[in-house]
């Protein structure tokens, strides 16, 4: 475990020095995310000009939800995005060979090697927006609820990565340039809406098979619930199931890996 | 003209090489967009209990979303950042050696994409109307379709020119992805592709109309919905052309300056 932590510290150091070399990209990424946050906040602000509630949530509650999915997105973009985007290229070009021969978990290396230091500032800003949204909320929030909410937001980013991974990993069999990533980017838009607006089987799907509602909407629900434990445990159970599934599919994929370069 | 049509058909062939991918992505994208919009508007109309929001009933709001989804795809084209890739990997070099205009080559590819999207829209509308029916308060006419489609195609030229200018930044900077995505967010929001501009507060709507974006989104959608006259159609197209001309001139200036900076990777 300590070996992995030490290795991750090396990844961080390397990523920050790389980010400082490409400063323009750093500014563009920062501005891009600022615009993304502003557009999302403005979208719901406009919705609430025409209604007091959205599926039972007030504007303050929806703003916290927006803050949550912004943080989920920011954590994913900072910690996982560069890695998941490059998996297809690693498989198709045969560069995965270099990771397979190392004496550590290939999954760990492939998932966490590239920390996007140029998105780190955005993560701080997203966190600031979330804190601002929470301080605006007029009802008292319990300490347990806040802690579980923060845990589930971080869990949401991890779950987002796991689902993204499941859409990319078919590249082992299809050899396509991006796996099913375009479909994932489309489906991921479900995360940006409160799960309470969805009804019947669509809501069930978004809470289980394609758990986009567990990433930000469910954490926000936990924050407002008097008994947050059942929802928290349910969310963590789904994440654990997805993690197991990803590891299984990853191993199957590696068995199918033909190593294009050798 | 001969090579223009050759490039145009080559792009069409390229798009249909991975036919299943192409159609799955298209229909899945549209289905998700419409599903999310349906549940959002349904929640809003149900909770609010009102029959109309900013002049839209629930069926008309859904129709707005349908035309925003299809019209948006016609206007935005493929957004593949081809120019930036050509600059980064040196692919631009071969075009500089041929006796053809690079920008026209790229435009022929964008036009091919928009043309296919028009046919996809026709097919999509046919399916949607066949499955869900046509809202009672909506008068479907080919005249409205013609107005909306032509306005979208004119708007696609403007969007293409602005998008390529952003790609040209690749002559100077190491990555233009962030800049390009930023432009997409702003353009789509102010165009009314996310939410009708009628729902915006007055001040924000006025600001939006100082930009070209409502003329490439909200106005063509109004035409599809039968809420515009031919006079308004002419007005919208004139505004877009007037925006396109200076941007195209800037595009030429940036191109010539950028070429001086082009290193021709791989030569």
Image (cartoon, coloured by chain):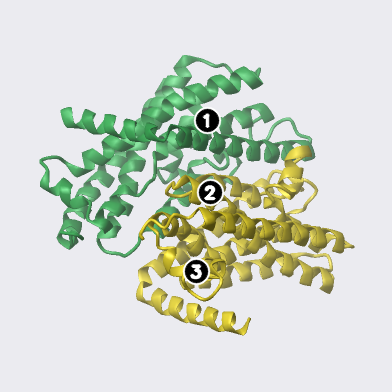
- Residue at x 64% of width, y 40% of height: B36
Query: On the image, numbered disc 1 is attached to which residue?
Result: B67
In this rendering, which labeled residue sits more in front, label 1 or label 2?
A: 2
Residue A203 position, x and y percent, is: 75, 43
Res B197 → quadrant: top right
In depth, the one of B257 and B9 nearer the eye is B9
Q: Chain of mark 2?
A: A
Give coordinates of residue A211: x percent, y percent.
69, 51
Whether residue B67 is visible = yes
Q: Is residue A86 left or right of residue B8?
A: right
Q: Chain of mark 1?
A: B
Left or right? Give the position of B219 relative to B110: right
Are marks 2 and 3 in one subunit?
A: yes
Q: Nearer the viewer, residue B20 or B1?
A: B20
Q: Residues within 10 Å of mark 3 (few under 14, many from 20)?
A: many
Q: Are marks 2 and 3 in contact (CB under 8 Å)?
A: no
Disc number for residue B36? none
Q: Which colour is chain B painted?
A: green
Gap between marks 1 and 2, in whole Å?
33 Å
Subunit of label 3: A
User: Residue A119 has which mark?
Assistant: 3
Q: Is residue B93 left or right of residue A154?
A: left
Residue B222 vertical placement versus B105 (above, below): above
Residue A14 at what x, y percent from top left? 44, 79
Q: Which chain is yellow?
A: A
Q: Secondary structure at mark 1?
A: helix
> Residue A170: which numbered mark, if any?
2
């Amino acid at each position: 475990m300590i070996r992995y932590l030490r290795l991750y510290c090396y990844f961080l150091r390397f990523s920050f020095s790389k980010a400082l070399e490409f400063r323009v990209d750093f500014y563009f990424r920062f501005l891009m995310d600022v615009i993304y946050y502003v557009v999302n906040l403005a979208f719901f602000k406009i919705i609430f000009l025409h209604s007091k509630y959205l599926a039972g949530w007030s504007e303050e509650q929806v703003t916290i939800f927006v803050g949550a999915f912004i943080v989920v997105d920011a954590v994913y973009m900072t910690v996982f995005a560069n890695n998941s985007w490059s998996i297809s290229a690693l498989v198709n070009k045969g560069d995965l060979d270099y990771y397979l021969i190392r004496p550590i978990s290939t999954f760990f290396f492939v998932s966490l090697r590239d920390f996007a230091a140029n998105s780190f500032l955005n993560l701080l800003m997203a966190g600031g927006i979330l804190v601002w949204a929470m301080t605006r909320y007029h009802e008292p929030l319990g300490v347990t609820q806040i802690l579980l909410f923060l845990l589930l937001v971080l869990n949401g980013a991890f779950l987002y990565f796991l689902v993204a991974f499941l859409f990319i990993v078919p590249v082992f069999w299809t050899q396509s340039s991006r796996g099913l990533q375009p479909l994932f980017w489309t489906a991921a838009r479900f995360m940006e809406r409160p799960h309470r607006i969805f009804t019947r089987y669509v809501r069930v799907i978004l809470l289980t098979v394609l758990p986009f509602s567990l990433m930000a909407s469910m954490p926000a629900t936990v924050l407002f619930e008097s008994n947050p434990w059942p929802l928290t445990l349910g969310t963590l159970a789904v994440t654990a199931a997805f993690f197991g599934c990803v590891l299984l599919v990853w191993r199957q994929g590696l068995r199918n890996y033909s190593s294009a370069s050798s | 003209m001969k090579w223009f049509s050759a490039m145009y058909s080559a792009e069409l062939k390229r798009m249909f090489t991975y036919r299943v991918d192409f159609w799955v992505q298209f229909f899945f994208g549209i289905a998700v967009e419409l599903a999310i919009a349906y549940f959002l508007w349904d929640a809003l109309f149900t909770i609010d209990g009102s029959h109309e929001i900013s002049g839209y009933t629930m069926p008309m709001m859904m129709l707005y979303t349908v035309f925003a989804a299809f019209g948006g795809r016609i206007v935005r084209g493929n957004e593949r950042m081809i120019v930036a890739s050509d600059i980064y990997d040196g692919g631009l070099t071969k075009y500089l050696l041929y006796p053809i205009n690079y920008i026209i080559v790229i435009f022929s590819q964008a036009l091919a994409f928009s043309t296919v999207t028009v046919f996809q829209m026709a097919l999509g509308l046919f399916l949607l109307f066949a499955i869900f029916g046509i809202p009672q308060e909506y008068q479907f006419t080919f005249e409205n379709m013609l107005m909306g489609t032509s306005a979208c195609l004119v708007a696609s030229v403007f969007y293409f020119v602005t998008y390529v200018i952003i790609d040209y930044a690749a002559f100077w900077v190491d990555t233009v992805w962030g800049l390009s995505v930023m432009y997409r967010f702003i353009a789509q929001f102010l165009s009314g592709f996310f939410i009708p501009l009628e729902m915006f507060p007055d001040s924000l709507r006025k600001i939006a109309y100082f930009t070209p974006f409502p003329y490439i989104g909200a106005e063509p959608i109004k035409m599809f919905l039968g809420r515009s006259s031919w006079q308004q159609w002419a007005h919208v197209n004139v505004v877009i052309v007037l925006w396109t001309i200076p941007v195209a001139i800037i595009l030429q200036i940036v191109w010539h300056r950028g070429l001086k900076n082009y290193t021709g990777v791989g030569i």
